[in-house]
Amino acid sequence: MTHRHHAATIVLSAVSLAFAGAALSQQTDFSKVEIKTTKIADDFYTLEGQGGTISVLTGPDGVLLVDGQFAPLTEKLAAAVKAVSDQPIRYLVNTHVHGDHTGGNENFAKLGALIFSRDQLRERLAHPNPGADGRPGTPAPPKALPVVTYDNEITIHLNGEDVKLIPIRVAHTDGDTLIRFPKHDILAVGDYIRTVGYPRVDLTNGGSMNGLLAAFEQTIQLAGPATKIIPGHGPNTDRKGVAAQRDLVLAVAAKIRPMVEKGNTVEEVIASKPTAEFDASVPNAAQTSEQLVRWLYAEIKARFSGNWKLDNTFNGRVSAVHCTLVQSGDALTGSCKPDLPGMEAAKLTGTVSGTKAKWGYDLVFNGKPARVDYEVELAADGTMAGNLLRNGSASPIKGTRLP
Ligand SMILES: [Zn+2]
């Protein structure tokens, strides 16, 4: 990378558009990019060029790629694959929607690769968010869209390996996948883990800091002591490295939370340098610290936002309601769906006051219209408790967060 390109990368990292593959691709001279191939294990390689690290599984059944970087690099990437395998590229798995991971999709499809992704990723490629300037996003060409999508774990049996595509519900985006190679003892995880800079979430593509913490836990559970973890960007890591990232996010959030409670602005929180104790040990800390603080601040402030399971005890019987709450300032919207056959989700409205919230909705129950209201308070452990009010009677509820 030339000095000029390095500078361009840093400027981009400093703004929230750092994900925007398109923006990066406009500034990168792809003719200068060289592909670096690293052997990780027998029949397993990584390719680094520009954008997300690619994992390559080789063998007599054909090649499987995890991610495909930018379109202008496909020829070089295909040549790098050819240097380690004489077999065709049969499968391409997208870890998440960002252009530096999916930009090569169309080209690899034309080379014969079958593309896999989460349902949500395909939907976002086909219907992208508007740009920062408000202009509509450009839909990916039809050939770039994944052919096989999934919302639960699936397995590709290839080259004696059982490649597990494991949904990471909501983390860097809402369409992340962890790709597990059990026999090679390797996890390829995309950008919800990165070893350069602080952790990143893309809120406009459905990412979440709470989800990121759940994803770290899920990854730690799946990894053994010797498991190699290939992040979206930066050197490989392991279970200990992911645990350290989890602890870092928890520690920074613990510093920010009381400031949010006191009513401090995000600028005041940034000025207090809540990442200071970690800055020396995180590469590119200076370029990525502020953004981490902003994401955590927004999420802590919108403390009710997320997916909740609320257990209601009524006449000694427990029933559950699943609610998706969206907090914006002091207003709550979203929907709740009782875990009963035939019940539809009902749209809710409500208000937040500090750690307390109220919301309610109308629904039809046993053929009759009914009104359901909730009054809850958040506990220090992140759960919520309160009452469900229905037909003038109150019954206790307890809420736990779902990823
Ligand atoms: Zn990304």
Image (cartoon, rainbow, N blue to C red):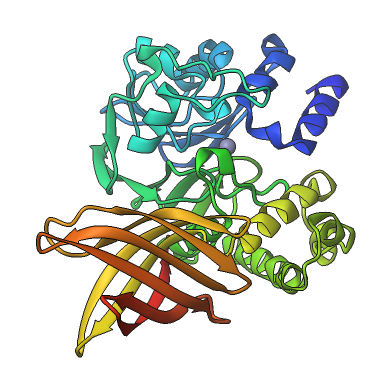
From the top left corner, tell me how far across and down residue 167 is, in percent. 36, 48
The total of numbered circles placed on residues is 0
In depth, the one of 181 and 201 nearer the eye is 201
**Quarter placement of the C terminus:** bottom left
**The N terminus lies in quadrant:** top right
Q: Which of 347 and 322 is in front in this view?
A: 347
Q: Nearer the viewer, residue 378 or 196?
A: 378
Q: Ligand 1, what quadrant?
A: top right
Q: Residue at x 36, y 13 (%)?
A: 142
* Whether residue 93 is visible: no
Nearest to the observer: residue 114 or residue 330 = 330
> In screen coordinates, is 342 left or right of 103?
left
Residue at the image point whose x is 25% and y is 44% from the top:
154
Residue in the picture at 60% in, 60% down: 330
Q: Quadrant of residue 150?
A: top left
Residue 346 percent coordinates (x, y): 30, 54
Tell me: residue 72, above or below residue 100.
Answer: above
* In the rendered image, the vertical position of residue 91 relative to residue 274, given as above or below: above
Image x and y of residue 189, in percent: 49, 46
Q: Which residue is found at the position 35% from the left and 80% from the top? A: 397
Horizontal relation, residue 167 to residue 192: left or right: left
Residue 59, visible in the rendered structure = yes
Where residue 307 sits, quadrant-wise, is bottom left
Query: Percent position (x, y) of residue 135?
Result: 60, 18
